[in-house]
Image (tube, rainbow, N blue to C red):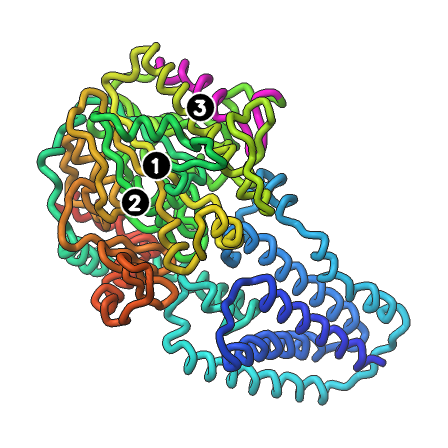
Amino acid sequence: MGDNFFLLTLIFLIAKSYVVSRFVFNLEIENVMQELILFLANAGSIMLILSLVAIGKKETLKWKLLVTNILGTFILYFNVVYYRFFNDFITLPVLFQTDNASDLGESIISLMNPLDIFLIADFVLISYLFKYVKIVENKRKYYKVAFASAIILLLNIGLANIERPQLLTRSFDRQMLVKNLGVFNYHLYDGFLQAKTNMNRALADNSELAEVLNYTESIKRPVNEEMTGVAKGKNVFVISLESTQNFVINNKVDGKVITPFLNQLIRQEDTYYFNNFYHQTGQGKTSDSEFLFENSLYGLPRGAAFFTHAQNEYNGLPSLLKEKGYTTSVFHANNKSFWNRDVMYKNLGYENYYSESYYEVNNENSIGWGLKDQSFYEQSIPYLKELSQPFYSKFITLTNHFPFSLEQEDESIPEWTSNDGTVNRYFTTVRYEDEALKQFFERLKEEGLYENSVFIIMGDHYGISQNHNEAMGQYLGKEITSFVNTQLQRVPMIVHIPGETNGRTISNVNGQIDVKPTILNMLGIKPDEDIQFGSDLFTKGPDQFVVLRDGSFITDKYVYTDQKCYDKSTEKLTEQNACEPYIKQAEDQLKYSDQVVYGDLLRFLEEKKQGE
């Protein structure tokens, strides 16, 4: 019976990990080989873990097996909940961001499913056996299981590398890692990467800085001189539209316009609208968006730089503007420590951070993640009026956040009527967000803060993940292929300059990494030597190219994603060699940017400046 307790724990954990991997995670198993690799990966890792746990004192074996089962189930379920929203897998940096967990309440609850109970159904039988089973010492058998598991894992890694060469070099592709290594081995590898990350800073030196500087200089494009200084001396508003994707612009749902104010704004002659602008965020979501556009550096392949590397040296946009006499402020009616913002904002150069404590938040003016946008903007006006001009002010909205809750009194359009409640509600909260922004503009005009300002309005990341492809396909009237999903990563990017007369829609392929150099050029500021991976949004050239955090990239002609090359004109797969020239370029951009952050290389840039 003692062996049966071990065997049942083994069977249940393998079954749970395989079923979750196969039917909850969208891993796109394409052939028998991939099916075998997935099973071997889960079975081998669990066999090894349990056999190592079993080698020890028999008096504590039952407890150790029970605790291992509970911990294994906990890890699986954490990934299930995280995957349902982010279509991604959790990493150690994200797992330990416990300060964020208290603010996730409603979102986490909405992601739970009654069928999740089956993940703990085995505990009923195990609890019964725990009381009656007596453990018989059988260490030789456990050694044999450990040896067999090692053979299975070696076979798994061998087959995985045949199926996907250089698998372990693609740490940013967590779907690929989980599909080929299994959930538990993925987390062991993630732990190794975290340890390696901690070593990178200690071992970095200024020779790496020179290498990165040479690279960024080689990809640097000239600014559009027609836009140089066009907003010189003006106040700068950056408005981050939560979870807003570009497909809602100039679109309707059930005959109702979704974004009437933004639609009207982008038609004005004082507005530039970039309709091929992509978010490039990773696990850091909104914080990644901020990191990208204020540093012109990529977010990290794992976790959020705001959390893991907040103590680094940065040449953040707020810091550069503060040196030029700008008052720098950020407005966000949320817990000040969420995403470690209270620490990171100081390091980026913000003088003022108007967090939740600066606002009156009650049941009437809040919902979901906090203060409703309309009240947020209205309560921010007095603080804005106190700022010395010119100022740089960033606003981060909240209402259009998953699970997209809204009270009926705030609805301007009704929810859509598909079978997917998340998608249905999304249109309603986007419409509310649009109306709140309109009211904000009207208030700024009333307060005399509009005319002498430039407005950067940008979506921060996607709102509708791939887990809602069926409803999105219904809405768009077409299948959501990998190509379509990549195109859905476009977010609104609007530059509004009151008094301009040359506004237009610009179809350059760009991303969030290009915002910092664009703002600096519009303000007529040429920074000292700096590391920037982006270029002026207004510069059009033959080398249009944007890289997403998962290694996908988009050019003016092609989309490369999931290791497949698509022709944008046909939206169909094309020859791989059409995308081949850009693959290394995409990998290099991510690699060198990661090198800057992991090694804290900008500290050497400061030393270099002081030595000159």
Q: Earlier in the sequence, mark 3 or mark 2?
A: 2
Q: Does the magenta stretch include residue 377?
A: yes
- Residue 310 coordinates in the image, percent (x, y): 40, 44
Write down the region rendered in magenta.
364-386
Q: Residue 458 carries which label?
A: 1
Q: In which quarter of the image is the C terminus?
A: top left
Is residue 298 shown left or right of residue 136?
left
- Residue 434 coordinates in the image, percent (x, y): 42, 28
The crowding category of the residue bearing disc 2, from other C-alpha atoms within 10 Å (few below 14, some 14 to 19, many at least 20), is: many
Is residue 575 shown left or right of residue 117?
left
Kind of residue indicated by mark 1? Met
Q: Is residue 603 magenta?
A: no
Do the residues bearing badges 1 and 2 touch, measured as CB atoms within 8 Å?
Answer: yes
The crowding category of the residue bearing disc 1, from other C-alpha atoms within 10 Å (few below 14, some 14 to 19, many at least 20), is: many
Kind of residue indicated by mark 3? Ala
What is the distance, in whole Å, between disc 3 and disc 1 at their CAs?
15 Å
- Residue 210 coordinates in the image, percent (x, y): 18, 57
- Residue 124 coordinates in the image, percent (x, y): 83, 64
Q: How many marks?
A: 3
Q: In the depicted view, which residue is nearer to us: 150 or 274?
A: 274
- Up/down of 158 relative to 258, above or below: below
